[in-house]
Image (cartoon, rainbow, N blue to C red):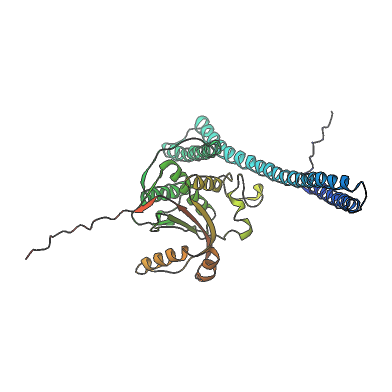
């Protein structure tokens, strides 16, 4: 009996390409310095060959600089390609797990119902569990389709005037149902603001933001959505969670494709690493901007809730550094994602009067 040893692959690292790139850069720099020095020395001599050295210096120096720039660009692209390959590997592991778990669950319950006598109550319970697994698969497929649609680009959506409060409430309720959280997990504070944008993109944008806030929030999670509209028509929606926060040096990286913090096999949160990538691309497609900063939860009562919302609106108008220094330090630290979209307006509603005022 032949014993086949498993094939072992050494993990790919950046040590070899980075070392080779640095060595080539140093050699090109030394060659350029020596060549320019020798050429200048020959050119400054007052003889018949000095003109030839000046021509060599003028023609060769740009070429050596171009070679140096090419080596640096090649090293940069190699590092980016390596990181993308590693993120794609993590993405495959994540999607495989997300697909395998509900399929295995569906298979188990279907085999149980086929091979054994199951009571009516158990059948109802099994059907509910299988429906949750199917919805999980449907959510994953829709997520992948959204990412492919955004990556492909060029697909036009019809823009319309949307009631922002309605969209945010719908996304919040859907997230609470998906994660089996009570409705008060996500609180929405939004005045009568209308945004002129495609409804499909707006729903994808805030659905991913709320999902991300719930997944990486505290235990139990707590999410708060606050929307304000500036006189210029810019609408800023802040999504605040009560999680551990994102380090400042990783806040730009989390918007990359397939980016998830930590090792894929050590994570306890489900996901594909495409949520914030979709958020960034959709925000830019709508002509908006996005910013991540530390958030702070403060104790507030219902009576001073409006005052706190006004204070938050004023705080958003300052820079991120000033906001971090002046915000309240009491309460739990979290993450606040501010999404600013154009083409917004506040719709003023006429107050309804029950009894007309008597005329004199």
Q: Is residue 240 visible?
A: yes
Q: Nearer the viewer, residue 72 or 29?
A: 29
Residue 13 in view (yes/no): no
x%, y% of residue 257? 60, 44
Count of numbered circles in the view: 0
Left or right, 267 with respect to 237, comes to: right
In what quadrant of the picture does the N terminus appear?
A: top right
Quadrant location of the C terminus? bottom left
Image position of 266 with respect to 120: above or below? below
Task: Tell me the residue at 81%/44% (across/down).
Answer: 59
Can you give x and y, in whole percent of width and height, for residue 104 in the image?
A: 57, 36
Q: Is residue 232 left or right of residue 80?
A: left
Residue furthest right as drawn: 47
Q: Residue 71, percent across and down?
A: 78, 45
Would you identify the image quadrant in which residue 303 lies?
Answer: bottom left
Residue shown at 70%/42% (left/top)?
81
In the image: residue 42, left or right of residue 268: right
User: Camera-side residue: 307 or 291?
Assistant: 291
Q: Position of residue 221 (x, y in %)?
A: 49, 57
Residue most extreme to the top? 1
């Amino acid at each position: 009996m032949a014993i086949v040893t498993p094939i072992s692959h050494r993990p790919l690292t950046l040590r070899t390409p980075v070392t080779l790139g640095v060595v080539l850069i140093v050699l090109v720099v030394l060659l350029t310095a020596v060549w320019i020095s020798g050429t200048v020395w020959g050119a400054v001599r007052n003889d018949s060959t000095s003109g030839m050295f000046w021509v060599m210096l003028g023609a060769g120096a740009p070429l050596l600089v171009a070679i140096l720039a090419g080596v640096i660009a090649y090293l940069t692209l190699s590092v980016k390609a390596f990181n993308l390959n590693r993120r794609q590997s993590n993405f495959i592991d994540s999607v495989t797990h997300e697909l395998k778990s509900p399929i295995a669950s569906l298979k188990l319950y279907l085999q149980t119902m086929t091979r054994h006598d199951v009571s009516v109550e158990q059948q109802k319970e099994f059907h509910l569990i299988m429906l949750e697994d199917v919805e999980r698969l449907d959510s994953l497929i829709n997520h992948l389709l959204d990412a492919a649609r955004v990556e492909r680009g060029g697909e036009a959506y019809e823009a319309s005037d949307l009631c922002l409060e309605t969209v945010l409430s719908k996304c919040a309720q859907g997230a609470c149902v998906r994660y089996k959280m009570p409705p008060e997990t996500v609180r929405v504070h939004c005045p009568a603001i209308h945004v002129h944008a495609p409804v499909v993109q707006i729903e994808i944008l805030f659905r991913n933001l709320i999902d991300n806030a719930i997944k990486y929030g505290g235990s139990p999670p707590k999410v708060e959505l606050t929307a304000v509209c500036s006189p210029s028509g810019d609408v800023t929606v802040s999504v605040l969670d009560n999680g551990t926060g994102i380090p400042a040096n990783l806040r730009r990286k989390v918007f990359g494709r397939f980016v998830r913090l930590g090792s894929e096999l050590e994570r306890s949160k489900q996901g594909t690493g495409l949520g914030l990538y979709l958020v960034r691309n959709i925000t830019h497609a709508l002509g908006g901007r996005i910013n991540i900063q530390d958030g702070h939860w403060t104790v507030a009562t219902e009576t001073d809730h409006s005052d706190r919302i006004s204070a938050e609106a004023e705080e958003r108008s300052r820079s991120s550094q000033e906001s971090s220094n002046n915000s309240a330090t009491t309460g739990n630290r979290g993450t606040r994602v501010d999404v600013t979209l154009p083409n917004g307006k506040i719709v003023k509603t006429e107050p309804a009067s029950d009894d007309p005022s008597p005329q004199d």
